[in-house]
Amino acid sequence: GELKTLARTLVNGRGGRGFGGRGFAPGGRGRNPDAAAAAAAEEYAAARERAMKLFPPLVARDNARLTNVNQMEKDYRSDAAAGRKVFSSEAVKCDTCHSLGGARTVGPDLSSIGAKLGKQALFDAIAMPSAAIAFGYESWLIETTKGEVVTGVILEETPAGVTVRVDATQEVRLKPADIATRTRSNVSLMPEGLINAMSPQEVADLLEYLSTLRGNATASISR
């Protein structure tokens, strides 16, 4: 699963920086730099064509193809105010699991996310949420002695027990004696497929809005 996510990012995301240009010259020293660059570009293009068959590009709503963020910025004029509406829309519901400076919920606080991640990284995080799970927000599968399974983020762990946030509004408290096994999951609680619920314009607007979230300086737009 991790390799598939990485491959999809390389093929459909940033796609090709460092290949076919300076610093990548197959064949070692002594080759003509221009010829080496041309050969590298040809090799990369062939590899990319093969990889595209295994890792098809991400698509938005109505099967609209999404490429990298640089291309999206050329194709769509993004609007942060419109992106704020997408953030809270019924189709996406980002505000159900993410706060903007409020109380902790099941997902990380996003009030300063624009100061931490660029647009491409934001896009990758939405499209492939399991690729990089924020520390402290890992999902755990806990099996109780009664055979029940509780899945969620561990909020607190003390000698008295474990508190698990299973969704945006519900917490489960378990005593140590009630826990049979616990396993950390490599799958994020953030659902896959959010990109498929948005149009390319909505994706561009959401990324623009998220990029403006830099703490107190953006408090007015985040409301």
Image (cartoon, rainbow, N blue to C red):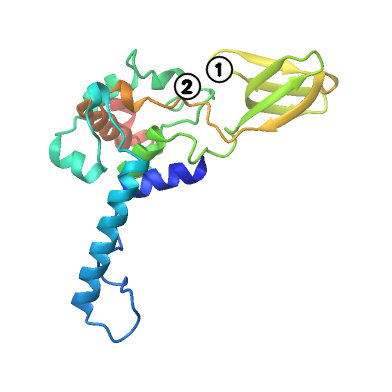
Tell me, for residue 97, which label it has, or none.
2
* Residue 60 horizontal side relative to residue 184, left or right: left
Q: Residue at x 77, y 15 (%)?
A: 147
Which amino acid lies under the numbered mark 1 shown in the image of this protein?
Asp
- The one of 152 and 45 positioned closer to us in this rendering: 45
User: Mark 1 falls on what kind of element?
Assistant: loop
- The one of 34 and 146 positioned closer to us in this rendering: 34
* Residue 77 horizontal side relative to residue 214, left or right: left
Please identify the residue farthest to the right as the structure is shown. Answer: 177
Tell me, for residue 167, which label it has, or none.
1
Specify the quadrant of the image occupied by residue 13.
Answer: top left
* Residue 216 horizontal side relative to residue 62, left or right: right
Please identify the residue farthest to the bottom as the structure is shown. Answer: 30
Alpha carbon of mark 2 to alpha carbon of mark 1: how far?
A: 8 Å
User: Mark 2 falls on what kind of element?
Assistant: helix
- The one of 53 and 16 positioned closer to us in this rendering: 53
- Residue 101 is situated, as x and y percent measured from the top left of the image, at 45, 28
* Residue 52 horizontal side relative to residue 32, left or right: right
- Residue 52 is situated, as x and y percent measured from the top left of the image, at 31, 44
Q: Residue at x 38, y 43 (%)?
A: 8
